[in-house]
Image (spheres, rainbow, N blue to C red):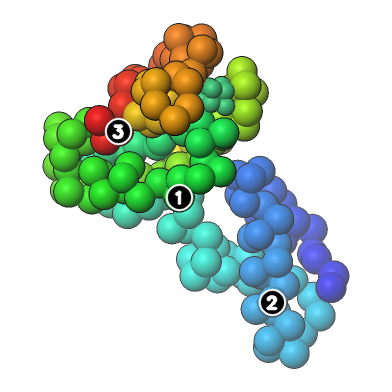
Amino acid sequence: MHWTEDALKQIEKAPAFIRGMAKRAVEKEVAKSGREEVTEADVRAAYEKYIKFAVNSGEGKGQEKTTKIAIVRCDTVAEVCPGIACFKAFNHRKLAFEEYGDNTEIIGFFTCGGCPGRRVPRLVEKLIPHGLDVIHLSSCMMLDDDYPRCPHKNQIKKIIEKKGIRVIEGTHH
Ligand code: SF4
C-alpha cells in the first residue's frame, strides 16, 4: 500500500502508542474501496471512525470532566485472580471507590509486572496523556493473606505520585 506524503504527515499526528493500529485501520478502509494509495483524506476519515474515541474518550464542550482511574495489582496474585472484586467494588462505587460519581471511568487495569513493580512507571506514563487522575493500588497488595503483602508498595506509590498522579491504597477491602 502506497502512502502519499500528506497522508504520512497526518498519521504522524496520532499518538505513538496507537499509530500502528491507526495505520492498519486506514489501510483496511482503503483496501475495502479497491484502492492502493492512502491519501490525507483517508487518514482523516479513519481517524473520525476508529481512532478519535481512543484519544479523547467522550469529553466534549460543556461536559463535566470525566474522572479517569486505573488499578495496579500484584503480578503474583493475578495468577489466581481475574479482578472480580476490584471491578465489583468499582461498578457499585463501594469501599475504596465510594467517592466517585457516575462520571468516572476505569482506563487501565494492569499488573505491576513482577517485583519490584518494574512496569508501573512505563504504563502510568502511557495513561497520563489519556487524562489519568488516580491510581488505586489493589487490595491484594495490601493484605497478608494467602500471599504476603507487597514489600515494594511504598516505592511504587512514590514513583506514581512523582508523576503527579494521586494514589489511593486499596480497592475492595
Ligand atoms: S512488586 Fe508487589 S505487587 Fe508487584 S509482584 Fe511484587 S509483591 Fe506483587
- Seen at 45% across and 50% down, the residue is 82
- Marks 2 and 3, the one that precedes in the sequence: 2
Label 3 crowding class (10 Å Cα cut-off): few <14, some 14-19, many 20+?
Answer: many
Query: Residue 95, position in %: x, y?
Result: 18, 34
Identify whether 4 is placed above or below 35: above
Q: Where is residue 162? Give x, y as percent.
A: 47, 11
Comparing labels 2 and 3, the label whose residue is closer to the camera = 3
Residue ID at (51%, 36%): 77
Mark 3: which secondary structure?
loop
Which residue sits at x=71%, y=55%? 20
Left or right: where 71 falls relative to 13:
left
Q: Position of residue 153 (x, y in %)?
A: 47, 15
Residue lying at the far right of the rendered structure: 2
Kindly identify which numbered label has been placed on residue 82.
1
At mark 1, the secondary structure is loop
Q: Of the numbered discs in the image, which one, if any, rests on residue 28?
A: 2
Of the numbered discs 2 and 1, the one sitting upstream in the chain is: 2
Using the rendered view, name the quadrant where residue 53 is placed: bottom left
Question: Is the residue marked by circle 2 packed among few (<14), some (14-19), or many (20+) residues within 10 Å?
Answer: few
Cβ of mark 1 under 8 A from ligand 1: no
Disc 1 residue type? Pro
Apparent side of residue 75 relative to residue 58 in the rendered image (left or right): right
Q: What residue occupies the far front of the structure in this picture?
A: 146
Vertical comparison of 149 with 10: above or below: above
Q: Choose the circle earlier in sequence order: 3 or 1.
A: 1
Marker count (numbered): 3
Q: Position of residue 6 (x, y in %)?
A: 73, 58
Mark 3, residue position = 171
- The N terminus, quarter of image: bottom right
CA gap, disc 3 and disc 1: 14 Å
- Give amino acid for label 3: Thr
Q: Relative to 13, is 171 above or below?
A: above
